Image (cartoon, grey):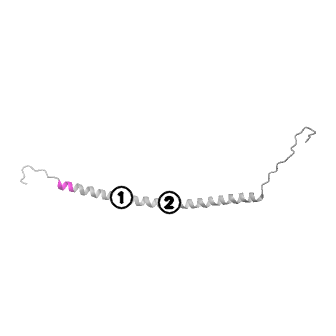
């Protein structure tokens, strides 16, 4: 390995070759990964849409129950007020025989 001009000469060239089967395997794996992610994301968006519908239905039924509960609370309070009014002793009127 004498260099007559003093220049550095690379005596060995490292040639890195990737086999075709490795390239095809990596490309196929990447394609499957992207396809799987696409379909998984599609399924996730469908599940989210169904969940939104369920939540909206739940909110509507909760509002209905709250309205009915408010009506029942009003009725109970009214009945309790009437019961207290009936059970309360009447003040004596001066000069009456009752």
The dominant secondary structure in magenta is helix
Checking the image for residue 97, the label placed there is none
Residue at image coords 37%, 59%: 65
Q: Nearer the viewer, residue 94 or 37?
A: 37
Residue 63 shown in magenta: no
Task: Give the residue pinned by disc 1.
Answer: 67
Q: Is residue 29 left or right of residue 45?
A: right
In the image, residue 73 lies at what x, y percent?
A: 30, 56
Quick one: label 2 or label 1, which is nearer the N terminus?
A: 2
Question: Which residue: 48% across, 61% down?
Answer: 53
Report how many numbered discs are placed on residues in the image: 2
Kind of element beneath mark 1: helix
**Image point (41%, 61%), residue name:** 61
Instruction: Give the quadrant of the N terminus.
Output: top right
Residues under numbered marks 2 and 1 in contact, where contact means CB atoms less than 8 Å apart = no
**Left or right, residue 46 beside residue 98:** right
Q: Is residue 88 left or right of residue 71?
A: left
Residue at the disc numbered 2 = 51
Image location of residue 27, percent across then percent down: 71, 58
Which quadrant of the figure has residue 5? top right
The one nearer the camera, 6 or 67, is 6
Task: Give the camera-side residue of 46 and 74.
Answer: 46
State which region is magenta: 83-87
């Amino acid at each position: 390995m004498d260099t007559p001009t003093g220049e550095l000469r690379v005596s060995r060239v490292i040639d890195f070759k990737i086999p075709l089967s490795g390239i095809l395997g990596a490309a196929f794996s990447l394609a499957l990964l992207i396809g799987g992610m696409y379909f998984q994301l599609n399924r996730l968006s469908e599940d989210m849409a169904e969940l939104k519908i369920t939540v909206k239905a739940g909110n509507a039924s909760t509002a209905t129950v709250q309205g009915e509960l408010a009506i029942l609370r009003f009725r109970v309070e009214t009945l309790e007020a009437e019961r207290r009014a009936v059970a309360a002793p009447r003040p004596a009127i001066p000069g009456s025989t009752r």
